[in-house]
Amino acid sequence: MYLNIKIHIVTSYESMIPIIQECIPKFPELDINYSIGDLDEGLFRPNKRRKMELK
């Protein structure tokens, strides 16, 4: 059984991007994305989207 696992990393520091990019190829079975932004805002968006899906 194959699971499509998606991971989105929100970092508040641009200096973390090269480290994340270096790690992505080590986990080819995962769909890893990233962005730079406010961590609180990054946590709020998926929760808001999930609440909309449940309605």
Image (cartoon, grey):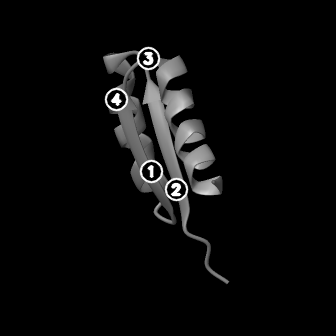
How busy is the neighbourhood of tag 4: few (under 14 within 10 Å), some, or many (20 plus)?
some
Question: Which amino acid type corresponds to the residue marked 1 in the rendered image?
Answer: Ile
Counting every numbered tag in the picture gives 4
The mark that comes first in sequence, 4 or 1, is: 4
- The residue under label 4 is 17
Quadrant where the N terminus lies? bottom right
Q: Nearer the viewer, mark 3 or mark 1?
A: 3
Compare residues 29 and 47 and report the one nearer the observer: 47
Q: Check disc 1: other Cα within 10 Å, few if <14, some if 14-19, many if 20+.
A: some
Position of the C terminus, as image quadrant, is bottom right
| For discs 3 and 2, the disc positioned in front in the rendered view | 3
**Mark 1 and mark 2 in contact (Cβ < 8 Å)?**
yes
Report the Cα–Cα distance between label 4 and label 2: 18 Å
Q: CA distance from mark 2 to mark 1?
A: 6 Å
Which SS class for mark 3? loop
Mark 2 falls on what kind of element? strand
Q: Position of residue 43 (x, y in %)?
A: 56, 29
Residue 40 pos. (x, y %): 54, 19
Q: CA distance from mark 3 to mark 4?
A: 15 Å
The tag earlier along the polypeptide, 3 or 2, is: 2
For the residues labelled 3 and 2, the Cα–Cα distance comes to 20 Å
Tell me the CA gap for discs 3 and 1. 18 Å
Q: Pointer 2: residues within 10 angstroms few (<14), some, or many (20+)?
A: few
Q: Does the CB distance between marks 3 and 2 fall below 8 Å?
A: no
How far is the residue under mark 4 from the one under mark 1?
A: 12 Å
For the residues bearing labels 4 and 2, Cβ distance under 8 angstroms = no
Q: Residue at x 44, y 24 (%)?
A: 11
Mark earlier in primary sequence (4, 2): 2
- Which residue matches tag 2? 6
